[in-house]
Image: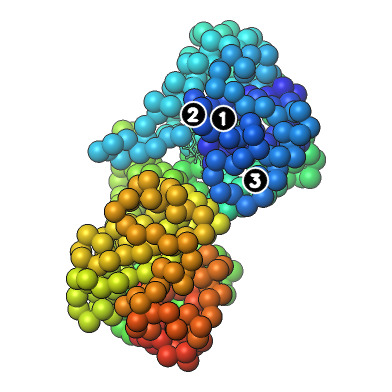
Amino acid sequence: MRISVVGCGYLGAVHAASMAELGHEVVGVDVDERKVAALGEARAPFYEPGFEDLLARTLATGRLRFSTEIAAAAGSQVHFVCVGTPQKRGEYAADLRYVEAAAESLLGVIESGELVVGKSTVPVGTAARLADLVGEKVPGAMLVWNPEFLREGFAVQDTLHPDRLVYGLPDGPDRATAERVLDEVYAPIVARQTPKVVTDYATAEMVKTAANSFLATKISFINAMAELCEATGADVKQLADAIGYDDRIGRKFLNAGLGFGGGCLPKDIRAFMARAGELGADQALTFLREVDNINMRRRIRMVELAREVCDGSLLGKHIAVLGAAFKPDSDDIRDSPALNVAAQLQLQGAVVTVTDPAAIENSRRLWPQLDYATTPEEAAERADAVLVLTEWRQYRELDPVAFGEVVASKRVLDGRNALDREAWTAAGWTYRALGRRAG
Ligand SMILES: NC(=O)c1ccc[n+]([C@@H]2O[C@H](COP(=O)([O-])OP(=O)(O)OC[C@H]3O[C@@H](n4cnc5c(N)ncnc54)[C@H](O)[C@@H]3O)[C@@H](O)[C@H]2O)c1
């Protein structure tokens, strides 16, 4: 099939290459010239394991190309909309201007019988509105909503092997055609008996925001338990292990620590609350405000903990921050808890050196006033405290004995409960973590 993918960021670029991998002829369109140039030369404009190989492989087949011109989408049977939906400045609601611009530009090139497929995460009601627009401007063209559940760090695997497909389809005569076309797009995935939920627009839109709200709630739940553990002397890691054995609860997403960030969970729960308010159903989601609050409190607590281990004052203290990305295996620093803490420490008088295997370049652009180092050893040279704020494997596997040689004081704050406490304390480190007693 001929497919266009409009918006080639973390979601769209991987989607475009994955669709080519499935055998389709794909054009990726983005307004960002630098991104398009890099993608066309098989250079990933962001760090995502396995993506650059996939990109090179699919470009080499001749089935994948990139363009800054929406005209390049003409003639495709299916058009994916993968543009960003960030939080509006000064408001909780999602900023839909990119989705609207992408839809507008597509309307100039699509023809009757073609399918527009929304993948961006949007407030419930958006698809119905866009469907009216599409139907009005290009009679015979169809719109479906097909939310994306990929996780950064596993984006290639998740796109090619999703755990479910969700189709939000129009009512009426186009419904069966739209489903058949999507099945054809995802043919190998459908053939593997991947669970498929075929539903209406509103449910499909809500599946995505509900899933993210649930995940955020689970993280904030364990972080709320961490606050209580701090007040009582209990141990949140053991608590999580013990409740996680109950398979109704499960252990995943129960790691207490610095909480969630990134380009999805924070803005998605806020947009969900804003939309609920517009719909007169705000009471249903007031708990998400608390989820958000618990999450943000962890960042403040981390700074307090750093002050505590630095003998009550951050002024002039050298602090090494290991990790800047919002999660490991990504260079994404959007609303990164690690960078947020690093910046707060710096603003409170500490001398902060940040390191990250993939996100230094992005971080430097956002926080040029922080110092950056390429290795943990370099960052930790003569440090008064080391904070592990993103659980990259490289940091989890640091040798506490050798690493102890470079610092001024062996004080480590494990912001992700990711280190082996026994090994670090045995090597003479003062070990502190959120929700656990001093080690
Ligand atoms: N990143 C994820 O892990 C992920 C997972 C699931 C869903 N989503 C959702 O997918 C959407 C995209 O997220 P992302 O992380 O890829 O964002 P992103 O900011 O990395 O990418 C968005 C891209 O769209 C481009 N763009 C903006 N306006 C355009 C236009 N009019 N025409 C063409 N291109 C345009 C931008 O230049 C950018 O490259 C969001 O709604 C997000 O919530 C993201």
> The disc labelled 2 sits on which kind of residue?
Asp
Which quadrant: the N terminus?
top right
Q: Nearer the viewer, mark 1 or mark 3?
A: 1
Q: Position of residue 89 (x, y in %)?
A: 28, 36
Q: Which one is earlier in the sequence, the residue at label 1 or at label 3?
A: 1
Q: Dot 1 corresponds to which residue? A: 36
Q: Position of residue 90 (x, y in %)?
A: 25, 38
Relative side of 266 to 121, left or right: left
As helix, strand or loop, the secondary structure at mark 2 comes to loop
Relative side of 283 to 254, left or right: left
Give the residue drawn at x 65%, y 44%.
52
Which quadrant: the C terminus?
bottom left
> Ligand 1: does it lie within 8 Å of the C-beta at label 2?
yes
Q: Nearer the viewer, residue 120 or 430?
A: 430
Measured Cα–Cα span from mark 3 to mark 2: 19 Å
> The disc labelled 1 sits on which kind of residue?
Val
Circles 2 and 1 in contact, beta carbons < 8 Å: yes
User: Residue 32, labelled with which disc?
Assistant: 2
Measured Cα–Cα span from mark 1 to mark 3: 15 Å
Q: Nearer the viewer, residue 394 or 173?
A: 394
Quarter where residue 260 is shown: bottom left
Q: Which one is earlier in the sequence, the residue at label 3 or at label 2?
A: 2
